[in-house]
Image (cartoon, rainbow, N blue to C red):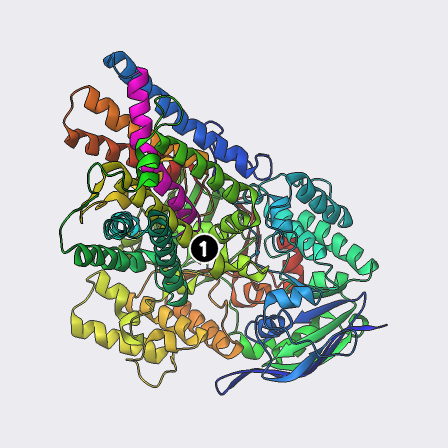
Amino acid sequence: MMTNVATGSPAQGGLVQSARGLLLTREAGVFGALLALCIVFAIASPVFLTGQNILNLLRQISLLGVLAIGATYVLIISEVDLSVGSLYGFAGMVGGLLIVSGVPEVAAILITLTLGLAIGAMNGAITVAGRIPSFITTLGTLYLIRGATLVMSNGMPVSLPHGQGAAPILTGLAQGSLFGNLSNQVLVLIVVAVLGFFLLHKTTFGFHIFAVGGNDRAARIVGVPVSRTKIIAFAIAGLLASFAGIINFGFLENVQPVTGIGLELDVIAAVIIGGTRLGGGEGSIPGTLLGVLLIGVVRNGLILLGVTPFWQTTLIGAVVLTAALIGGLTSKK
Amino acid sequence: MTSMLQLRDLGKSFGSFWALRNVSIEFKQGEVHALVGENGAGKSTLIKLIAGVYQPSEGAIIGPLGTELKMKTPRDALSCGIGVVHQELDLFDNLTVAENIALGIDDSGFVKPSKDKMAARARKALDELQEQKILPSMRVGDISSSDKQLVAVAKVLTWDAKVIIFDEPTSALNAAEAARLLERIRHLRSVGVTVIYVSHKLGEIFSIADRISVIRDGTLITTRPVAEFDHEKVVDAMLGRQPAEIFPVQVKPRPTKEVLLDVADVHGRELAGASLKVRAGEIVALAGLPDSGPSSLLRHIFGMDHATSGTISISGRPIGRSTPRAAIRSGIAYLPADRLREGILPLMSVLRNAEATDEAMHASDGSTRRGKALAAIKRLSVRTSSILNRITSLSGGNQQKTLIARWLVMDPKVLMLDDPTRGVDIGAKSEIYHILRGIADSGAAVVFTSSDSLELARLSDRILLFRGGKIVDEIVRDVTHAELDRAISAA
């Protein structure tokens, strides 16, 4: 049972608050923290509120946001996907190698995304069929996929050939800007977020995600396809991780075999900060976006203040703990 | 009257063990059919067969059209018009009432049904139950357990259930809530729904049932109209022998003995000023509705929950803000209700389980400990082919005896047991009763709670009745369990 700080414990049956109402209050909490941080940074640094900085900041969090939207599905069903960082690097590498070796760009993208989807689905299928905690399944695939990336690249980075207009779609998506100075990456995030929101909050599949996360035994009894729902959730996370990975390749025009190491932890941190319950059953796309934004603001603000990157990591850790403590202390059990 | 459901020679075996055999019952349209039996008699196996959780090993379940119903999942059973309202409700605390009801039935399209549509469906089902207080927009995690019961009923009604099984529906309800639920059940009967009603509470059964089927040792003893029964006949049929053969002789409290446990005005979670004294040699039963305090008081005494005020003393010495380790050190033992999660160490042997507390407390050296554990296991006659087998290979009753043996090793001053015979068969129950009496006779104080009022009435020297977190009555004279049931619900 969950409640918010302001009202204390809910009287049995007395507190008429829908799940959405509760989520909104949690989101409001994240939003408040975000606002406070922005005010502090705006006062401390004259650059923080400039248009250019804000556009930069949004561009910097876009891919993290795409990954975090996928992870939201997985965390709401009370599972976790540790392999998305590896998959992010793997997708960039597969896409890069295919394009460099002359495969048409559209085909290269489709192959990469299909692989990402399949690997995600495999994470889900192994977890469900093998009755393995997803923490273990995806710890295994984290290494497997990273290993595959190292093997196929032979440990070397892969770069787009310069100045030949190779991969116009990817570079356009990652580097271009359709609207003024707003990076297309931000548009990508917005599109993914809108689709992700619709799927999670408006469709039967999303309904089933919340049901499975709330009580999977009861979900099975009323006929919710529990295994299928879980596998699809992992597949979405895999698809979005590979999508982000290949866009990253389009942005940097090269990919390292170590790209994305540790990224899964940023992703999980963002989702948790955004109010998704680790125990499952609660969470939202707007919340996740706020969590991503909060991480982005912390990083950006501290850089502007000239603080070493080591302190960024420390502060993000403090934010995660605070968010988790607030979640833990305000839920009843 | 038409037959809605007919069980023909139904049987279910697990390996070579028949949990249920040769059961033939006909459930008629518009009747309330009570199913009674001791714990472990086979009631829950029967319910699971009807609800599609288990498939029969032999025999058949025949539907209203005379065809055999083959149900492989609970969902199949729902589609056949058979719904179960479980003791532990299959609801989603994180969803609203409307979403709980819509889930599984109103969610075949790609897009989720609109809030309004779900709310309308929920409203209709709640109206069928003549329930106005519960709103479709309420979050199920925020409503009371009696309201959850009604939501669960509304949910199966939405599936157009013609047969509804209630599994111990009032165990967590107070008298007013239980009366309200029984009223709704009578209403369901009047519109032609068949109700299969499973309960320990005979008073309730006599007030609502049309017919009673008694199950014992996996077989059907009898099915008869309620008019041909009275309390005693039902109990005799359930037990198959006289209660005197099952329970040890009761003795009156011996007030001259030393007070071992003294609880004075304890406030805390679910407790509002509980006070009691328990003397050496007596067995005291704590009775009351589940959240009225009995179990919670045991947890407070054992240091698992902490009192906000009041004192708890053992042999006259206050124990202060305690932990389980400190409680054990001062001579308290506690057998939790949830054997699987708080009792057994599932990966360890019977012997290691019996030794566990002594070992964790460094109470005695290795060989002494082993000697004590072996003696305790023998005294409790734990049945196992080897004491080195994993405890999970034992029956529920033998697991429970092993856990009692664990405390015997510690030679406690105060032995507290939270619903000690839950999920234990009648034979092991009787053994446990005699052992507890023996422990009391050897000078310990025994305090227990139970979901079984026969046990509360027959095993104890006196009964303390809880209401709203404190003790409101003490029953020392002989009391039948039917009277006790009424007192508990009224409390």
Q: Is residue B222 left or right of residue A11?
A: right
From the top left corner, tell me how far across and down residue B134 is, in percent: 67, 41
Mark 1 residue crowding within 10 angstroms, few (<14) / some (14–19) / many (20+): many
From the top left corner, tell me how far across and down residue B457 is, in percent: 58, 64
Q: Residue at x 23, y 30 (%)?
A: A315
Which residue type does callout 1 highlight? Ile
Q: Main secondary structure of the magenta part?
A: helix
The quadrant of the image that shows the N terminus of chain B is bottom right
Residue A306: in magenta span: no
Q: Which residues are magenta?
A: A49-78
From the top left corner, tell me how far across and down residue A268 is, in percent: 32, 43
Residue nearest the observer in this picture, B441 or A251: A251
Q: Is residue B192 left or right of residue A280?
A: right
From the viewer's perspective, is residue B121 above or below residue A129?
above
What residue is shown with label 1? A232
Q: Residue at x 35, y 63 (%)?
A: A132
From the viewer's perspective, is residue B281 above or below residue A38?
below
Residue nearest the observer in this picture, B281 or A42: A42
